[in-house]
Amino acid sequence: MAKIISGKELSAKLKLEMADEVKTFPAKYGRVPHLVVILVGEDPGSVSYVTGKAKASAEVGIRNTTIRKPESVTEAELLDIIAALNLDDEVDGILVQLPLPKHIDEDKVIAAIDKSKDVDGFHPLNVAALWQKQPCTLPCTPKGILKMLRTAGVEIAGKRAVVIGRSNIVGLPVSKLLLDANATVTMAHSRTRDLAEVTRGAEILVVAIGRPKFVTADMVSEGTVVIDVGVNRDPETGKLCGDVDFAAVEPKASVITPVPGGVGPMTICCLMENTIECFLNKKNRS
Ligand SMILES: Nc1nc(=O)c2c([nH]1)NC[C@@H]1CN(c3ccc(C(=O)N[C@@H](CCC(=O)O)C(=O)O)cc3)C=[N+]21
């Protein structure tokens, strides 16, 4: 039987702690932190995530503005909105929900956000700072994963960690954080030969490839710590499921995260934390 790390419970506890802190801000700083989320289009997944972010903001006492634009919005219009938010002293965090429609250059939009308001940690200057071990805003999902590992008492130093997936938002940064925590990190992906052989060597396995129930019991060794970053629809049941076949893998794992209720809520929790950090950095600069 594995120990199941509940991201839902951990994030609830952390949000309460943040709410206590945010309560003290109006007296100290004259206002609470303000997060602006930009949502383009009507994708039900994106709408649901953005709703989750607004709900968490309310719980923590963070002011949340969601700007909704139609799928047809132009890149220029989006860049104008970001430029105005960059200049607005009452805005601490800017998040552009991804993915964006194909006619918009995502990299250009992310780079347009002021680094000091980049609560996602996606800006090239934040990415560079992460890889140079300089102070930076950490991307929310990798940050949440490390928090879960620490809370569960998982020792990282010296361990063999395997990360499946090499995206800018999860695979690459979580690999870097594990490396900084002194794990020996293998970055595996869709083109890795003998993937099961590689994953069987993992003591910590982080899965972020976006394929429902991709990791099966034969790919995991007894006692492995399994972190499931997937948010997929099960093609058979239509229910939310991870990249890991939880029912099959859980009995072999020592520690495992569920979907839903695992990494997802921690991602949102870290977004709240990053918004508070950006707010405090600004207040301490002025
Ligand atoms: N600029 C940007 N920043 C992001 O952080 C970002 C993004 N774009 N685009 C999409 C991905 C995905 N993501 C999730 C956040 C929370 C849950 C989450 O809380 N999931 C719940 C279930 C939610 C449900 O029921 O649909 C859970 O796992 O328990 C999932 C996925 C953030 N992302």
Image (cartoon, rainbow, N blue to C red):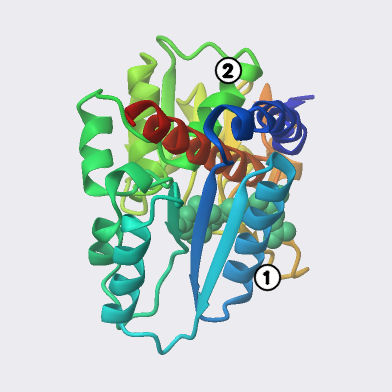
**Quarter containing the N terminus:** top right
User: Do tag 2 and tag 1 residues touch (Cβ < 8 Å)?
Assistant: no
Eyeballing the image, is 128 above or below 178? below
Mark 2 vs mark 1, CA separation in Å = 33 Å
Label 2 SS = helix
Q: Position of residue 255 (x, y in %)?
A: 67, 24
Eyeballing the image, is 146 above or below 142? above
> Residue visible at 71% across and 27% down?
20
When asked about the image quadrant of residue 83, the answer is bottom left
> Residue visible at 34% across and 74% down?
78
Q: Which residue is mark 2?
A: 150
Label 1 SS = loop
Q: Is residue 112 left or right of residue 240?
A: left
Q: Position of residue 284 (x, y in %)?
A: 38, 26
When asked about the image quadrant of residue 42, the answer is bottom right
Q: Is mark 2 within 8 Å of ligand 1?
A: no
Give, as a three-letter code, the residue at label 1: Pro
Q: Which residue is mark 1?
A: 235
Q: Position of residue 113 (x, y in %)?
A: 30, 56
When asked about the image quadrant of residue 139, the answer is top left
Q: Position of residue 160 (x, y in %)?
A: 42, 20
**Closest to the observer, 138 or 148:** 138
